[in-house]
Image (cartoon, grey):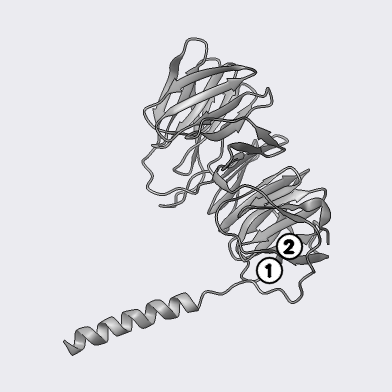
């Protein structure tokens, strides 16, 4: 009995010492808060390219939309042609264009998608993906990636590269679909981690495909594949620069060959969201510290707001989080 008691005591001491040892970002100086913050509705769902507020408004990367979508639906994506994709957790999906709506039923919930050439390129919760022809109302191609047990909620949407659809999967791979023939033409391996290994970022930078999982950044071009191995919180592109925000509090500026040009570590910072806006770098730590710096990190200021509790998202000039929105135009370094 005494041995069991000693074992339990040892476990409890280990657990509590582990919790108490967690360290947080503590800036040396903090700026007074200007009139940059106001209240708003809470974010109830978000993905890589948008968020849904509790009043059913939608946040895209560029603006806030009043769509009055059904209560159990959430925003997925919006194309340049103003086609909007929304879905619920039961496999129902709606394609909204102008004043029309097309309903689609999938066997699993849609978590990512985009419309190209009147085709919905989709990714489902079970890592199934494919092409749904909106004209014939039928699936033109379907496949399924390896089963995943945990994912990062910032699931990236498919993108277009010329006549190809690039589909980011949940198991660290990218599949390339030919839109004219509706077939799979290539599969690219990005990362082989066992958990939280979905593609969280995918963009085209000139003729280079920039792809990231929470564990790695990869640049794919005719020069081959280059890798930048860090534990990643966020990625942002600005002109020819790639900014990587890592889980150890480092912000790094890379060129298109993934070579570090500048970097600065904000010790123990845990970034919730980050972006590049008007040539300034913004990174919100989960304790509510907002770092604003120039692109080579030689000048910066830190502002203190309330702790980040829940989802956060950047739309236009605003950072939305915990029922608040911060106006980035009012903050500088």
Residue 65 shown left or right of residue 10 in the figure? right
What residue is rendered at 60% in x and 27% in y?
Answer: 84
Residue annotated with mark 2: 291
Going from the N terminus, do you reach mark 2 or mark 1 first? 1
Q: Secondary structure at mark 2?
A: strand
Which secondary structure lies at badge 1? Answer: loop
**Residue 9, image x and y in percent?**
30, 84
Query: Which residue occupies 55% across, 18% down?
Result: 101
In this picture, residue 330 sits left or right of residue 304 = right
Contact between marks 2 and 1 (CB within 8 A): the answer is: yes
Visible residue check, residue 91: yes
Q: Position of residue 288 (x, y in %)?
A: 65, 64
Q: Residue at x 52, y 44 (%)?
A: 190
- Pick the residue in front: 138 or 286: 286
Front-most of 126 and 1?
1
Q: Quadrant of the C terminus?
A: bottom right
State whether residue 287 is above or below residue 56: below
Single out the mark in the foreground, 2 or 1. 2
Q: Which mark is residue 278?
A: none
Toward the bottom, the furthest residue is 2
Residue assigned mark 1: 266
| Residue lying at the far left of the rendered structure | 1
Q: Position of residue 187 (x, y in %)?
A: 49, 34
Q: Is residue 136 above or below residue 294?
A: above
Residue 242 shows in the view? no
Q: CA distance from mark 2 to mark 1?
A: 9 Å
């Amino acid at each position: 009995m005494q041995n069991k008691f000693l074992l339990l005591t040892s476990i409890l001491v280990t657990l509590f010492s582990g919790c108490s040892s967690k360290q947080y970002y503590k800036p040396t100086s903090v700026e007074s808060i200007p009139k940059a913050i106001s209240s708003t509705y809470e974010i109830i769902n978000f993905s890589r390219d948008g968020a849904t507020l509790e009043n059913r408004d939608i946040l895209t990367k560029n603006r806030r939309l009043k769509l009055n979508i059904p209560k159990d639906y959430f925003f997925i994506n919006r194309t340049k042609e103003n086609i909007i994709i929304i879905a619920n957790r039961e496999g129902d999906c709606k394609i909204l264009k102008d004043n029309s709506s097309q309903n689609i039923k999938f066997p699993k919930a849609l978590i990512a998608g985009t419309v190209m050439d009147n085709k919905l390129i989709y990714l489902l919760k079970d890592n199934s993906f494919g092409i749904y022809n909106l004209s014939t109302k039928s699936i033109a191609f379907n496949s399924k990636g390896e089963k995943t047990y945990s994912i990062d909620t910032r699931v990236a949407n498919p993108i277009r590269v010329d006549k190809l659809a690039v589909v980011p999967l949940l198991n660290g791979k990218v599949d390339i679909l030919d839109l004219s023939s509706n077939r799979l033409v290539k599969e690219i391996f990005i990362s082989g981690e066992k958990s939280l290994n979905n593609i969280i970022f995918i963009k085209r930078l000139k003729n280079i495909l920039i792809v990231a999982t929470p564990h790695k950044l990869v640049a794919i071009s005719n020069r081959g594949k280059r890798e930048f191995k860090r534990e990643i919180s966020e990625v942002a592109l600005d002109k020819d620069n790639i900014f990587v925000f890592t889980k150890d509090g480092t912000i790094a500026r890379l060129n298109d060959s993934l070579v570090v040009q500048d970097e600065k570590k904000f010790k123990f910072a845990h970034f919730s969201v980050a972006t590049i806006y008007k040539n300034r770098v913004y990174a919100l730590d989960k304790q509510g510290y907002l770092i604003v710096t120039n692109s080579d990190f030689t000048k910066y200021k830190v502002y203190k707001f309330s702790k980040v509790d829940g989802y956060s998202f950047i739309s236009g000039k605003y950072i939305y989080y915990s029922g608040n929105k911060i106006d980035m135009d009012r903050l500088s370094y």
